[in-house]
Image (spheres, rainbow, N blue to C red):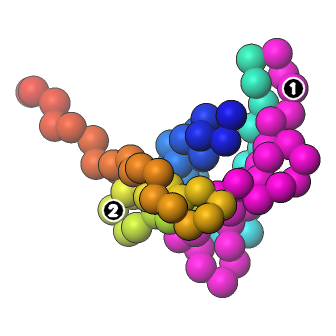
Amino acid sequence: MRIAIIAAVSVLCMCSLPVHAAEETRFYDAQGRYQGRATTNTANPEQQSVYDNHGKYVGRVMTDENGNARVYDSHGQYMGRTTGQTPKTKQ
């Protein structure tokens, strides 16, 4: 469950993080039930904190200037990354 929420946040961070600081993103499952939220850290706009549906901290996502996101669990253990670079298409 936590991994799914953090993975979803990492994908969204690539697109939404540079736009607004102090923004909150809410997550819902396929049936529309609230699953958690991610909030941008106002002191560090490249970081989003992730919380489950009970408000418990489950991890963070750090995004660099290229849109690459690194995901960490609530204990600071590295869980994986995404890349913000899109593959080149043939013309």
Residue under pointer 2: 66
Q: Nearer the viewer, residue 19 or 3?
A: 3
Q: Residue 80: x percent and y percent?
A: 41, 50
Secondary structure that dominates the magenta span: strand
Residue under pointer 1: 33
Residue type beneath disc 1 = Arg
Q: Nearer the viewer, residue 67 or 75?
A: 75
Q: Residue 28: x percent and y percent?
A: 78, 30
Residue 18 visible in image: no
Q: Vertical placement of 89 versus 39: above or below? A: above
Which range is magenta? 31-59
Query: Which residue appears at 84% of the width and 22% of the height?
Result: 32
41 within the magenta span: yes
Query: Which residue appears at 9% of the width and 27% of the height?
Result: 91
Q: Vertical placement of 55 versus 75: above or below? A: above
Viewer-nearest of labels 1 and 2? 1
Local crowd size for mark 1, using a 10 Å CA cut-off: few (<14), some (14–19), many (≥20): few
Q: Residue 42: x percent and y percent?
A: 69, 78
